Image (cartoon, rainbow, N blue to C red):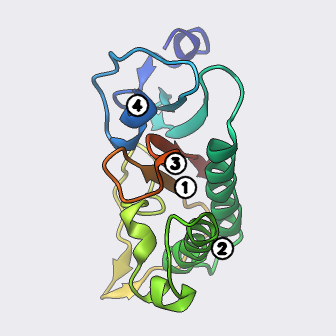
Amino acid sequence: HHHYAMNGAPHPAYGTIVGSGDNANILHYTQNSDVLKNGDLVLIDSGCELQGYAADITRTFPVNGKFNEQQAALYNIVLKAQEVAFEEIKPGGFMSHANKLAMEVLTQGLLDLGILTGDFDELMAQQACKDYYMHGLGHWLGLDVHDVGDYKINNVEREFEPGMVLTIEPGLYISEDSNAPQKYKGIGIRIEDNLL
């Protein structure tokens, strides 16, 4: 908040989220009062409001500066999902296609790690990765952090047009009470950027 103010942004665009360890698996964790522990990841979802426009960015990084093997594996899956989705974020593209591409990466990654088991096509049809990725890929961004705008017009998905601004924010959330292997439990990762 200090950096926002020092750069001309009078306040955050929304309540900042700072969750470490299993708290990173709570999508809108706002208590922000737990201790950051060595070996955990910390997820920070924060954005300023500048000249009436909102930003919404999330980063996840190790408290101690070094990913362990499981954290790095999950982080790289989320990063790859975001990069694949970026390719669809252009005029003529569709959010549903970007989300499908991201979900393919997340599903294959969870399958490769043994967090999901079964046939890839069946897992995709069941949207099995939604057990660990329970939100959408992104949202409109502008005068509000979840800005106005229809995702469908006359029940037809809206294609991207020049000038649209949105977030792209895949994530994986392996809570302590999930069915995942123990070594992945308590890891929550989201990477969010704002695109024009």
Q: Is residue 116 above or below residue 2?
A: below
- Amino acid, disc 4: Ala
Residue that mark 3 sits on: 184
Residue that mark 1 sits on: 165
Quarter location, residue 87: bottom right
- Residue 88 is marked as 2
- The residue depicted at 54 percent of the width and 72 percent of the height is 103
- The residue depicted at 55 percent of the width and 61 percent of the height is 164
Q: Name the spot of residue 84 as percent of width and height, x first.
A: 69, 68
Quarter location, residue 22: top left
- Amino acid, disc 1: Val
Q: Name the spot of residue 192 as percent of width and height, x first.
A: 56, 47
Which marked residue is nearer to the observer: mark 2 or mark 3? 3
User: Is 131 left or right of 20, judged from the image as shown?
Assistant: left
Measured in 3D between alpha carbons, the distance from the residue under mark 3 to the one under mark 1, in whole angstroms, is: 34 Å
Measured in 3D between alpha carbons, the distance from the residue under mark 3 to the one under mark 4, in whole angstroms, is: 32 Å
Q: Of residues 47 and 40, which is closer to you in this image?
A: 40
Residue that mark 4 sits on: 13
Q: Of residues 124 and 158, which is closer to you in this image?
A: 124
The residue lying furthest to the front in this view is 182
Measured in 3D between alpha carbons, the distance from the residue under mark 1 to the one under mark 2, in whole angstroms, is: 14 Å
